[in-house]
Amino acid sequence: MSVLTFHSAGESHGRGCFAFLEGLPYGLAVDTDFIDAQLKRRQGGYGRGGRMKIESDKAEALSGVRHGKTMGAPVVLAVWNKDFRLEKAPELDCPRPGHADLAGHLKFGAPIRDILERASARETAARVAAGALCRLLLKEFGIEIRSHVVRTGPVAVPQDFAPSWEGLAKADASEVRCLHAASEPKMKDVIDQAKKEGDTVGGVYEIVVQGLPIGLGDHTQWDRKLDGRIAQAMMSIQAMKGVEIGTGFANAAKTGRDVHDAIEYRKPLGQDPAGGFMRPTNGAGGLEGGITNGAPLVVRVAMKPISTLMKPLPSVKLSTGEPTQADIERSDFCALPAASVVGENFLAFVLAQALCEKLGGDSIEEMKRNYEGYVKHLSQPRGGKSGGSGKAEDSSE
Ligand SMILES: Cc1cc2nc3c(=O)[nH]c(=O)nc-3n(C[C@H](O)[C@H](O)[C@H](O)COP(=O)(O)O)c2cc1C
């Protein structure tokens, strides 16, 4: 089904994190400064532990790139680890609640170290490198992604707080990536307090995408619906436990009249990826029936508090079954700002995958030709082509 695929390899303290991307078109300019800037954003944020001070992540293209452009061949990006000590890393005996430690050990019969090395969120460096490259593809089509933090632990921005698109560009200026001035210092206090108490914090971030054409994703099969694909991708990021599209959870308490977005048509000026069909509201978050509808895509993701606690929870010794406290590894106290950067970039992979499906094409040039033809078609008046009678239909199941 998918023409673009992504896989990662690598361990937290192995040689590095590796991203395998297959299906990128020929001729995409690979701006390594942009990719490295995304990797740097992933390393930042208030509440990080010691590891990020050791690493200074940069991506190296090992294959599929020549003269600064993709070759239409599989691309491998490497992010080398400075903290490479896999063979000498200490073994753990007391599994940490909230991690894959116990289940992984029992499932594979492997030492906890072998499980945690791969389960670690260090893997997100590979996702960001690959996602940033996909983001360069999206940029070619005017698609841009931004994000901000809307909750850190108990501190949430007001429900009606909706920064402008321009405002969202300023989130990186905040160490907690929060744009609400009154909430920002409270979020830092929550993280400071948790750190003092040997505890950790999670939260929620929101990602907004502008410039998506109508028609990415597909209503015809469960695994082609873009909302489902986004949810899977976001949920697969370490520690993400909730995904919401548009005003998803709040919608459940409302009636249809207050949730769904009316449809308007305005004659488009030039080529419009929404084809002149406008939505005055965006409760759907840019997706209807698993297909982008031309409105901005809005995705919220909930991150659980970091699992490794400096004041550890009860656990047992695997060797004896004796009760004890969980082991401690060097750890973040809050990684929400970094997680929002991971979310942005990994979402770029899912959207690039859907864009490649829609536009086909072996090269970026061909994709652009196909895009132009497609959005031109969207802008045409429908004439008699809608096939509808204008009469009420039975829309029950
Ligand atoms: C950017 C980022 C950094 C993370 N850093 C840590 C960390 O330092 N310590 C930790 O215990 N968990 C950290 N996590 C979360 C764990 O990797 C994750 O909770 C764990 O692998 C279990 O997976 P699950 O929570 O998805 O079930 C981080 C997650 C992300 C996205």
Image (cartoon, helix red, strand yellow):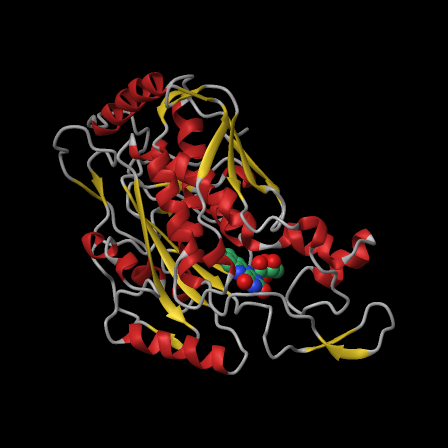
Indicate whether 356 appears above or below 58: above
Instruction: Please give left or right for residue 336 compared with residue 211 in the image.
Output: right
Q: Residue at x 51, y 42 (%)?
A: 126
Instruction: Please give left or right for residue 172 compared with residue 56 in the image.
Output: left
**Which percent across, then down, holds residue 82?**
54, 48
Q: Residue at x 72, y 67 (%)?
A: 95
Indicate whether 336 appears above or below 366: below
| Residue 276, image quadrant | top left
**Which percent across, then down, holds residue 346?**
45, 45
Q: Ligand 1 is found in which quarter of the picture?
A: bottom right
Indicate whether 245 appears above or below 353: below
Instruction: Please give left or right for residue 311 compared with residue 106 in the image.
Output: left
Furthest residue in direction right, as rendered: 320
Which residue is at the front of the view, 370 or 20?
A: 20
Q: Residue at x 37, y 34 (%)?
A: 32
Which residue is at the front of the view, 394 or 250?
A: 250
**Which percent across, then down, holds residue 264?**
20, 44
Q: Residue at x 49, y 51 (%)?
A: 234
